[in-house]
Image (cartoon, grey):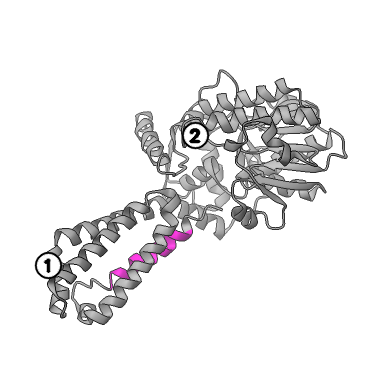
């Protein structure tokens, strides 16, 4: 790829890998345009970077790529999903859309850098890896100028997916829980991955397929211990090895949550990938570049770590519990209100309300509680549900203060107890902001 190839379109530009690749390419003097599904997210994650909105699920034909490729010298594909949220998504995002991209780029002699995954191929153990492999093969068949980069477990300053799970587990106090503790893992630092993309676009890395992994595999337990040390947490008192039989039900629950929009790192595909291990052959990349990929210890050494990273890891660990507690609290509040409709309405009747409006008010707000308790379980609505909980809590407090001020002196503290729930809803709203 010629040195003059400076105009680059980055797919999945707002993602964990894509955002860092965009920053590295801009630092290298290239003109970068990002592509992704959300312009709002792009403005927050990559302020000042030109961005076009596009969804790979809607870019399944070569002609649909043509307007997006105008003026581009190269495309870097950082887009990917771990598991189907709807039937056919993996195939569309990893293969069909990429095959169409390959045809459109070949016709215009636009080079492609494909970020695949170590182990991707037709005989891989998961559909994630097989669909990635089909996308790689389609680009090769298109005859496009091509570099396929296959990173192992990517470690960066930010944490999503697998690296987010590592930090969550490392944040568990006293003990270190781990399943598949002996699974082999080869890592790569985000800096090395971004440098490989820059080298590919500058023509320093020849066309071909390269595994981007450290030289020696480590066990998952060793990776967790190194992550825990980097974060600055106290060493675990003991390693709590979770039995293999626990993984299918945990993965099944995570898959069910996936259908509600929650992208848990414990889904069945992630578990299968951990079991098979993240491994590759570092030799071809070392031969091409004259140097290999940094080891995990060397990856962590230059990465800043402090209170912010420890707090992020702890909050990621607590966020599922916070959502569950809020959901149960609001569902229980609504159900109890309907169950004790007469008793709840009597409080309003004693304050001068008529019986029908008192019962109607209790029923309405009980149903509102139930609706909010269910809404927070649907990931696209969860953050807004938290704000709804906070707003309804304030309405309760204001109305009770006006209508039944004596409840503030109730020995059981029904109004006082609203305050921690209000605060938890606001905190959880912030925890739900992924990027």
Question: Hey, which quadrant is residue 214 in on the image?
Answer: top right
> In front: mark 2 or mark 1?
1
Q: Residues within 10 Å of mark 2 (few under 14, many from 20)?
A: many
Asked whether the residues under the numbered discs 2 and 1 touch, taking CB atoms below 8 Å apart as contact, a structural biologist would say no
Q: Residue furthest front?
A: 63
- Estimate how packed mark 1 is, as few (under 14), some (14 to 19) or many (20 or more) residues with alpha carbons within 10 Å: some
**Magenta residue check for 426:** yes
Percent of width and height locating residue 112: 74, 32
Image quadrant for the N terminus? top right
Which is nearer the eye, 426 or 63?
63
Residue 91: percent from left, percent from top:
55, 28
Judging depth in this view, the residue of 98 and 26 nearest the camera is: 98
Residue, disc 2: 83
Q: Residue 48 vs residue 250: left or right?
A: right
Q: What stretch of residues is rendered in magenta?
A: 416-430
What residue is drawn where x is 20% and y is 81%?
A: 406
Return the residue at label 1.
343
């Amino acid at each position: 790829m010629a040195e003059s190839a400076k105009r680059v379109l980055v797919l999945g530009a707002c993602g964990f890998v894509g955002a860092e690749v965009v920053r590295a390419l801009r630092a290298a003097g290239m003109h970068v345009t990002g592509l992704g599904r959300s312009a709002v997210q792009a403005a927050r994650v990559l302020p000042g970077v030109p961005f076009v909105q596009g969804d790979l699920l809607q870019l399944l034909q070569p002609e649909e790529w043509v307007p997006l490729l105008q003026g581009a010298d190269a495309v870097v594909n950082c887009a990917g999903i771990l598991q189907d949220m709807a039937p056919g998504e993996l195939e569309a995002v990893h293969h069909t859309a990429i095959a169409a991209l390959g045809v459109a780029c070949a016709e215009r002699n636009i080079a492609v850098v494909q970020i695949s995954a170590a182990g991707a191929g037709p005989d891989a153990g998961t559909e994630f890896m097989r669909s990635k492999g089909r996308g790689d093969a389609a680009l090769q068949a298109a005859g496009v100028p091509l570099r396929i980069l296959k990173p192992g477990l990517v470690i960066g300053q930010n944490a999503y997916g697998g690296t987010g799970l590592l930090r969550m587990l490392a944040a568990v106090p006293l003990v270190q829980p781990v399943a598949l503790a002996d699974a082999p893992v080869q890592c790569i630092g985000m800096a090395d991955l971004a440098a490989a993309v820059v080298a590919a676009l500058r023509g320093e890395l020849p066309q071909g397929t390269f595994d981007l992994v450290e030289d020696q595999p480590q066990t998952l337990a060793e990776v967790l211990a190194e992550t825990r040390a980097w974060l600055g947490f106290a060493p675990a008192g003991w390693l709590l090895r979770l039995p293999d039989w626990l993984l299918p039900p945990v993965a099944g629950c995570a898959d069910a949550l996936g259908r509600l929009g929650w992208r848990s790192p414990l889904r069945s595909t992630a578990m299968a990938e951990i079991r098979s291990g993240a491994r590759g052959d570092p030799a071809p990349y070392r031969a091409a570049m004259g140097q290999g990929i940094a080891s995990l210890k060397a990856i962590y050494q230059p990465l800043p770590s402090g209170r912010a990273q420890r707090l992020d890891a702890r909050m990621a660990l607590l966020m599922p519990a916070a959502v569950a507690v809020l959901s149960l609290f609001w569902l229980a509040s609504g159900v109890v209100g309907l169950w004790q409709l007469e008793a709840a309405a009597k409080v309003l009747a004693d304050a001068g309300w008529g019986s029908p409006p008192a019962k109607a008010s209790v029923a309405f707000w009980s149903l509102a509680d139930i609706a909010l308790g269910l809404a927070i379980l649907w990931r696209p609505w969860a953050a807004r549900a938290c704000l709804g909980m906070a707003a309804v809590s304030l309405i309760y407090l204001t109305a009770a203060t006006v209508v039944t001020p004596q409840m503030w002196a109730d020995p059981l503290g029904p109004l006082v107890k609203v305050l921690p729930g209000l605060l938890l809803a606001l905190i959880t709203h912030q925890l739900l902001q992924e990027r």
